[in-house]
Image (cartoon, helix red, strand yellow):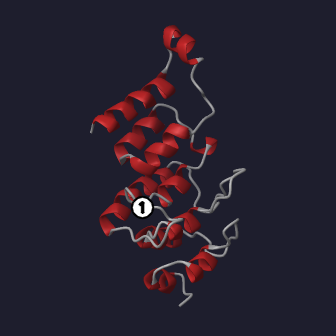
């Protein structure tokens, strides 16, 4: 809880900094970043994400849906082996994803990065072992055949995925 309180405080400073003292110390608010919203989408609650949106955070400045789709349970690493997210964990992220889509996030948006990434929310969800999130994204019209640096969601599922995810993506 202490971490979340500190996180919310950081978000308040980054998003709501109007005070000249804070602006002087931190160099002013970064108005074109989506970092706080992306972090909240990945580890925060619907309420936290809503507060950031109400405070003026812009979805188009980043990829919060991508981060929510690929959130992994604490202590897991999609690059170290197969992950299976619980329905409860997935449900919490789906609530955030629904809010983001209602506020303009698009399920087929590509993450632009100089780093090797999954690039699409659906591929990120498959990597996270997030079966419920994969189902939700498909129900929202995402294209499982869009190819990024890790291939498409179906390509990745064929290589490293649970049988259930393979069935959902029709590759089993």
Q: Is 162 left, or right, of 62 in this rendering?
A: left
Q: Residue furthest bottom?
A: 172
Task: Kindly identify the residue that appears in the image at 60 percent across and 79 percent down.
Answer: 154
Nearer to me, 171 or 95: 171
Question: Where is residue 120 drawn, in percent x and y?
Answer: 62, 62
- Using the image, determine if residue 160 lies above or below residue 40: below
Task: Kindly identify the residue that appears in the image at 44 percent across and 57 percent down.
Answer: 98
| Residue for badge 1 | 76
Task: Kindly identify the residue that appears in the image at 57 percent across and 70 percent down.
Answer: 141
- Using the image, determine if residue 67 lies above or below residue 60: below
Question: Where is residue 10 drawn, in percent x and y?
Answer: 43, 29
Q: Residue furthest front?
A: 80
Q: Residue furthest top?
A: 21
Q: Residue furthest right?
A: 114
Question: Where is residue 108 drawn, in percent x and y?
Answer: 63, 63
Nearer to me, 35 or 55: 35
Question: Where is residue 19 drawn, in percent x and y?
Answer: 49, 12
Q: Quadrant of the N terminus?
A: top left
Task: Kindly identify the residue that appears in the image at 66 percent across and 76 percent down.
Answer: 145
- Using a 10 Å C-alpha cutoff, classify the residue at mark 1 as few (fewer than 14 neighbours), some (14 to 19) or many (20 or more): some
Secondary element type, mark 1: loop
Figure disc tally: 1
Corner quadrant of residue 61? top right
């Amino acid at each position: 809880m202490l971490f979340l309180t500190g996180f919310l405080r950081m978000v308040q400073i980054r998003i709501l900094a109007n005070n000249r003292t804070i602006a002087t110390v931190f160099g002013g608010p970064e108005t074109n970043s989506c970092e706080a919203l992306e972090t909240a989408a990945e580890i925060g609650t619907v309420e936290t994400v809503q507060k950031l949106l109400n405070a003026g955070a812009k979805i188009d400045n980043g990829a919060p849906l991508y981060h929510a789709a690929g959130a992994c349970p604490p202590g897991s690493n999609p690059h170290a082996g197969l992950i299976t997210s619980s329905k409860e964990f997935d449900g919490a992220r789906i609530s955030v994803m629904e809010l983001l889509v209602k506020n303009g996030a698009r399920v087929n948006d590509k993450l632009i990065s100089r780093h090797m990434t999954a690039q699409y929310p659906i591929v990120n969800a498959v990597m996270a072992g997030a079966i419920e999130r994969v189902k939700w994204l498909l129900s929202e019209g995402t294209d499982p055949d869009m190819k990024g640096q890790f291939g498409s969601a179906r390509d990745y599922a064929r290589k490293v995925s649970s049988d259930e995810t393979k069935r959902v993506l029709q590759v089993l």
